Amino acid sequence: MCTLLYIKANPKSNEESRTFRISEQFIDAYKQSHPEDNIITIDLYKDDVYFLSEEAVKMHVTSPGEGKEHPILKYAYQFLEADKYVFAEPLWNLSIPSILKAYIDYITFSDITFKYTAEGPVGLCQGKKAMNITTRGGGYSEGAFASYEMGDRYLRTILGFLGVADFTTIVAENLDMIGTDIESVVGAAIQEAQNVAKSF
């Protein structure tokens, strides 16, 4: 049995969010193909994630021996113990929503999800896999604006830092461009998500 962390980063509802319309279908298809797996959903806008205050930063550098009930470290332990990750977020201002960055600050913790060695940092989340489901108003997968995309690229980089080399992206883009058939684009992404979920 595997544990999958489903990390949602959008204040909109499942019905209003184009991202969640895709990711929820991924999760439904995953459940059907992996009925024995445990799925833990973290809705960052409803959970206890907040931007690190001065007090929280001091807690963030507390010894990992504090345990898995620690208000900050518990997220890093939870991330380490999971086998698979599904991120669902829109591209906002060329990057991820700030609350998702706050979550990354929680889970990127020395001696839990990575460690420093004489040769440099080493990720401790090796052998795990990640799926990023994202939506974009414009086209950033290729062409002149590809270099502007810093959301999926950041997640791929930071998870690689933590040792997660198996990283896949499902994207629906150009959703705010005049003339785009939004339902067609979202529908194609949903179909892709349902297919990929079977073997994820």
Image (tube, rainbow, N blue to C red):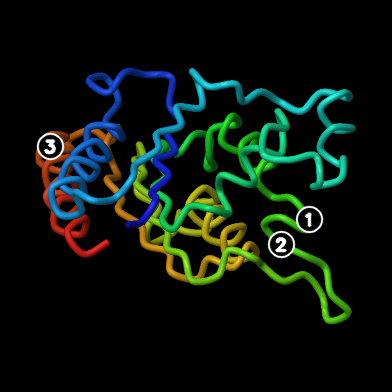
Q: Is 102 left, or right, of 3 in this rendering?
A: right
**Is there CB contact under 8 Å for labels 2 and 1?**
yes
Along the line of sight, the residue nearer the viewer: 11 or 85: 85
The image's mark for residue 181 is 3
Which quadrant does the N terminus fall into?
bottom left
Mark 3 closeness class: few <14, some 14–19, many ≥20 residues within 10 Å: few
Q: Please, what is the three-letter code of the amino acid marked with disc 3?
A: Asp
Residue at the location (41% across, 56% down)?
84
The image's mark for residue 61 is none
Residue at the location (30% across, 25% down)?
17
- For the residues labelled 2 and 1, the Cα–Cα distance comes to 5 Å
Mark 1 closeness class: few <14, some 14–19, many ≥20 residues within 10 Å: some
Q: Which residue is mark 1?
A: 110
Residue at the location (52% across, 42% down)?
94
Q: Which residue is mark 2?
A: 114
Q: Is 118 left, or right, of 68 in this rendering?
A: right
Q: Please, what is the three-letter code of the amino acid marked with disc 1?
A: Ser
Ranked by sequence position, the earlier of labels 3 and 2 is: 2
Q: Please, what is the three-letter code of the amino acid marked with disc 2?
A: Phe
Against 60, is 156 above or below? below
Residue 10, how many percent across, how many down? Answer: 43, 26
Camera-near label (3 vs 2) is 2
Camera-near label (3 vs 1) is 1
